[in-house]
Image (cartoon, coloured by chain):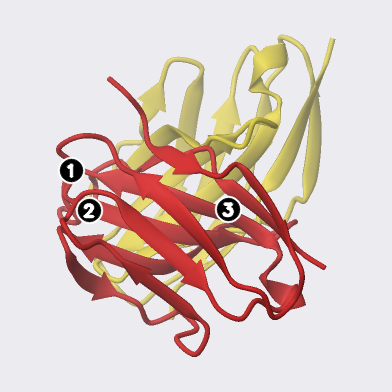
Chain colours: A yellow, B red
Amino acid sequence: AQTVTQSQPEMSVQEAETVTLSCTYDTSESDYYLFWYKQPPSRQMILVIRQEAYKQQNATENRFSVNFQKAAKSFSLKISDSQLGDAAMYFCAYRSLGGMRFGAGTRLTVKP
Amino acid sequence: EAGVAQSPRYKIIEKRQSVAFWCNPISGHATLYWYQQILGQGPKLLIQFQNNGVVDDSQLPKDRFSAERLKGVDSTLKIQPAKLEDSAVYLCASSLMGTPVSYEQYFGPGTRLTVT
């Protein structure tokens, strides 16, 4: 079974600084996708960024980028120029044909 | 474009009572998912529908949980009877299709269930 591990229950960052959230996963499959979702206190989950396992190039979406290390099964999220609105729970997720699996989440606090 | 709608937003019941949640996905989305999110944990998939058929219900506790999507549009999730450990947020999500797996899932606001 696929598992997703987020080893940082909480992280904090100063506004305008950069922070990296860690995620590792375990799978024996070769074709899969990885996602980072954001869940603000209002509870609506929002997709931040996705990465196809077959692509070597790391995905980037504006201030959000990932460091995908397939051999190490690592998928970290970097948030640059952090903003107050980035404060939320961040979930790493893995998806293959078997459905989506989420990590336990990292609570990000942004300090003004 | 309207998002995924869920109701009610909050529900408090006593153990052994029954409860039902409703979800209306984004128009045109063939795939619908129900997740359970216990406090401090990530969402856990309970059931996945493709149109009105079940694709995956391997993690659904079938002795007390049931779900249906009769016309391939909105869906209901029922718990009967509820236990204390069912206290959680129940999230509904939808996507255009279940495959390819890259299709984004859009989440509703969730229903927070408290079982006392």
Above/below status of A43 relative to A102: above
Q: Is residue B89 toward the left or the right of residue A27 in the image? A: right
Query: Which residue is rendered at x = 70% and y = 32% of the image?
Result: A41
Specify whether residue B77 is in view: yes
Specify whether residue A102 is in view: no
Q: Amino acid at mark 2?
A: Thr
Residue A27 on image: x %, y %? 40, 73
The answer for how far apart the CA atoms under marks 2 and 1 are is 6 Å
The answer for how far apart the CA atoms under marks 3 and 2 are is 27 Å
Which quadrant is the C terminus of chain B positioned in?
bottom right
Above/below status of A98 relative to A83: below
Please tell me whether mark 3 sits on a helix, a strand or a loop.
loop
Q: Amino acid at mark 3?
A: Cys
- As rendered, which of B69 and B85 lies closer to the eye? B69
Disc 3 designates what residue?
A23
- The answer to whether the residue labelled 3 contacts the one labelled 1, judged by CB atoms less than 8 Å apart, is no
Above/below status of B115 relative to A35: below
Residue A55 on image: x %, y %? 24, 45
Subunit that carries the residue with mark 1: B
Disc 2 designates what residue?
B31
Q: Are tags 3 and 1 found on a single chain?
A: no
Disc 1 designates what residue?
B96
Ranked by sequence position, the earlier of labels 2 and 1 is 2
Query: Which residue is rendered at x = 67% and y = 71% of the image?
Result: B86
- The answer to whether the residue labelled 2 contacts the one labelled 1, judged by CB atoms less than 8 Å apart, is yes
